[in-house]
């Protein structure tokens, strides 16, 4: 093991991850007058899903909309496993979060009267997704937030840092992290640590997520004994553009909101065969339908009539991605496939981002606030990152632990070589995909065992095991978790896992 070369004492908060959740938290800590260090493996604005978000942010700001209606749709999508109080916080604080982002300069689309333009997405009962430049919401919101972060003297940013492990003290509290910064390993101690490491898409071969996002936060938290909730709930986006790219570019759901249609190999619309809401059915239903049609010969998104010549102006990111792959979506249907897109499971938190471990907070996609349940409602995750990132930052800023207990030495998790990661990603696709069953999950767990025997307990293997074992243990289907061998809906239960106690299933409150 390489020696630790430096120790840095951060008189404030350490944030691991620099997507919308991490940076919202950083701004909130600074607002409280506390110092904050943000660690990102790459330059701000890259290596995070937040910058890639296309559709936008769901928020009840329309004349015929209310936070209560937004909450109803969110609870319905969550398939009985969302926490109504967390959903209430999300939907009632949503409008303020959007106003805050507008204040930072996020250029949400407006109509001629200056009203925010809001579009319809699947399973929303109202058009309520605030967009920027058609499909450029994530990049534009992040640009505004990054400019504010860079202008805030209380915030320091390391743009080549990767957390290898969390530092605990003898009382069990988290007191910092071991960070790999280029060639250096740096122990950073802090009053509180916020994990904002995003989702788990990079653990799968077929994903829309950046490669940097591989469930490291989940594993880091699990290693210090934090409770992990429902890791088996993985959302597959039904319309990743199927042109052999890794990660797969996305054809946003807003296209179907504008009238684009899924068609089969014979050119016929197929979604009505699967669900009365057709192309705007819940995301898990559409993902399974697209997977089924793929097996029969293929699935395409036909946006020729609905968008056609408006593509370059209305959906410039999708248009660019298609044209780069030699496909003109104005005149050709877009080949699509389901791809891992979002992780509903995560590190258990209370409404202020506090985890089950003292000194450790989590926010954004790596957290399980209770908002998404078994299935995320489209465009609720940027909102969650902004609302709960801010709450976590505010709460962490109030941590003033003196840190009298002695620090335990930090053991970095072994890293997984590139070829081994690719093996894992293929095994995750095959074993814990859109549909799973006991044989596929058992084979996956054997592959994780084999990789662990060869390379040690890498963070990616810990995160993958959490997903696979929880999926095997949940012997029914619910939300995004579909078991071929147990297709029926089972009891409304959460999976709770820790690495230190036996896995358990707990009935939802
Ligand atoms: C293509 C695409 C389109 C999407 N469209 C929408 C949409 O329209 N609306 C919506 O609401 N949601 C959308 N989502 C989902 C949404 O973007 C994410 O859920 C949300 O941005 C997550 O924010 P986050 O801050 O939690 O994570 P991220 O933005 O992914 O940031 C995670 C950060 O953690 C860093 N990190 C990871 N591991 C480590 C480590 N060990 N050490 C240090 N740093 C680490 C990463 O590099 C990154 O900086 C989309 C996602 C994708 C991929």
Image (cartoon, rainbow, N blue to C red):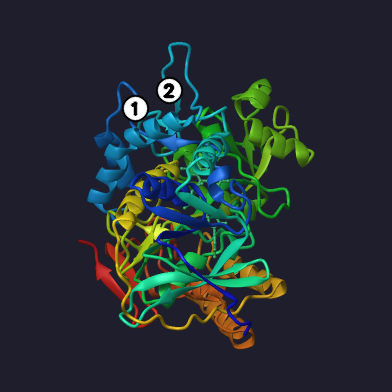
Q: Secondary structure at mark 1?
A: loop
- Say few, some or many: other residues with alpha carbon within 10 Å of mark 1 (under 14 / 14 to 19 / 20 or more): many
Q: What residue is shown with label 1?
A: 61
Left or right of 3? Residue 104 is left
Residue 120 can be seen, yes or no:
no
In space, the residues marked 2 and 1 are separated at their CA atoms by: 8 Å
Image coordinates of residue 90 in percent, x first then y, are 31, 43
Residue 232 can be seen, yes or no:
yes
Image coordinates of residue 165 in percent, x first then y, are 50, 74
Question: Which quarter shows the N terminus?
Answer: bottom right
Name the residue nearer the viewer: 22 or 280.
22
Q: Earlier in the sequence, mark 2 or mark 1?
A: 1
Q: In which image quadrant can residue 473 be found?
A: bottom left
Q: Secondary structure at mark 2?
A: loop
Question: Which quarter shows the C terminus?
Answer: bottom left
Image coordinates of residue 172 in percent, x first then y, are 33, 78
**Circles 2 and 1 in contact, beta carbons < 8 Å:** yes
Seen in the picture, residue 23 relative to 466 is either above or below; the reply is: above
Name the residue nearer the viewer: 410 or 216.
410
Seen in the picture, residue 324 relative to 497 is either above or below; the reply is: above
Please give the name of the residue rendered at 26% of the width and 70% of the height, measured from the top-left corner: 506
Q: Is mark 1 within 8 Å of ligand 1?
A: no
Residue furthest to the top in view is 113
Seen in the picture, residue 430 relative to 135 is either above or below; the reply is: below
Image coordinates of residue 192 in percent, x first then y, are 37, 63
Please give the name of the residue rendered at 70% of the width and 27% of the height, measured from the top-left corner: 330
- Say few, some or many: other residues with alpha carbon within 10 Å of mark 2 (under 14 / 14 to 19 / 20 or more): some
Left or right of 380? Residue 443 is right
Q: What residue is shown with label 2?
A: 116
Please give the name of the residue rendered at 34% of the width and 37% of the height, measured from the top-left corner: 94
Q: In which image quadrant can residue 361 be found?
A: bottom left
């Amino acid at each position: 093991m390489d020696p630790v070369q430096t120790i840095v004492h951060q008189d404030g908060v350490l944030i691991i991850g620099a997507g919308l959740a991490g940076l919202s938290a950083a701004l909130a800590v600074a607002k409280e007058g506390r110092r904050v260090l943000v660690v990102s493996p790459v330059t701000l604005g890259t290596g995070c899903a937040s910058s890639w978000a296309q559709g936008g942010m769901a928020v009840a700001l329309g004349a015929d909309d209310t936070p209560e209606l937004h909450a109803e749709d969110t609870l319905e999508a969550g398939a009985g496993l969302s926490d109504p109080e967390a959903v209430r916080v999300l939907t009632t604080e949503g409008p303020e979060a959007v106003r805050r982002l507008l204040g930072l300069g996020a250029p949400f689309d407006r109509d001629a009267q200056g009203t925010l333009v809001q579009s319809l997405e699947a399973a929303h009962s109202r058009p309520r997704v605030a967009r920027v430049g058609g499909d450029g919401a994530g990049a534009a919101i992040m640009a505004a937030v990054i400019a504010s972060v860079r202008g805030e003297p209380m915030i320091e940013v390391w743009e080549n840092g990767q957390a290898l492990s969390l530092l605990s003290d003898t009382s069990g509290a988290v007191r910092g992290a071991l960070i790999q910064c280029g060639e250096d390993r740096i122990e950073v101690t802090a009053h509180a640590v916020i994990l904002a490491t995003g989702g788990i898409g990079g653990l799968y071969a077929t994903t829309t997520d950046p490669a940097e996002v591989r469930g490291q936060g989940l594993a880091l938290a699990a290693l210090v004994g934090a409770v992990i909730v429902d890791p088996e709930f993985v959302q597959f986006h039904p319309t990743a553009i199927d042109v052999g790219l890794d990660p797969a570019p996305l054809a946003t759901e807003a296209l179907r909101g504008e009238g684009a249609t899924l068609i089969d190999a014979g050119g016929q619309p197929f979604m009505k065969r699967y669900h009365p809401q057709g192309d705007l059915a819940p995301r898990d239903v559409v993902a399974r339908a697209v997977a089924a049609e793929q097996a029969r010969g293929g699935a395409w998104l036909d946006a020729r009539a609905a968008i056609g010549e408006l593509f370059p102006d209305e959906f410039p990111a999708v248009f660019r991605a298609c044209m780069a792959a030699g496909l003109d979506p104005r005149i050709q249907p877009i080949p699509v496939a389901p791809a891992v897109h979002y992780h509903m499971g995560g590190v258990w938190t209370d409404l202020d981002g506090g985890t089950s471990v003292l000194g450790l907070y989590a926010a954004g996609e790596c957290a399980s606030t209770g908002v998404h349940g078994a299935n995320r409602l489209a465009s609720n995750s940027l909102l969650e990152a902004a609302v709960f990132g801010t709450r976590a930052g505010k709460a962490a800023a109030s941590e003033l632990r003196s840190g009298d207990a002695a620090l335990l030495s930090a053991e970095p998790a072994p890293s997984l070589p590139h070829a081994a990661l690719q093996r894992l990603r293929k095994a995750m696709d095959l074993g814990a995909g859109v549909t799973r069953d006991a044989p596929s999950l058992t084979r996956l767990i054997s592959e994780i065992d084999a990789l662990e025997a060869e390379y040690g307990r890498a963070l990616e293997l810990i995160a993958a095991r959490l997903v696979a074992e929880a999926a095997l243990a949940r012997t029914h289907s619910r939300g995004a978790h579909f078991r071929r061998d147990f297709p029926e809906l089972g009891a409304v239960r959460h999976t709770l896992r820790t690495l230190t106690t036996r896995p358990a299933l707990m009935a939802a409150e």
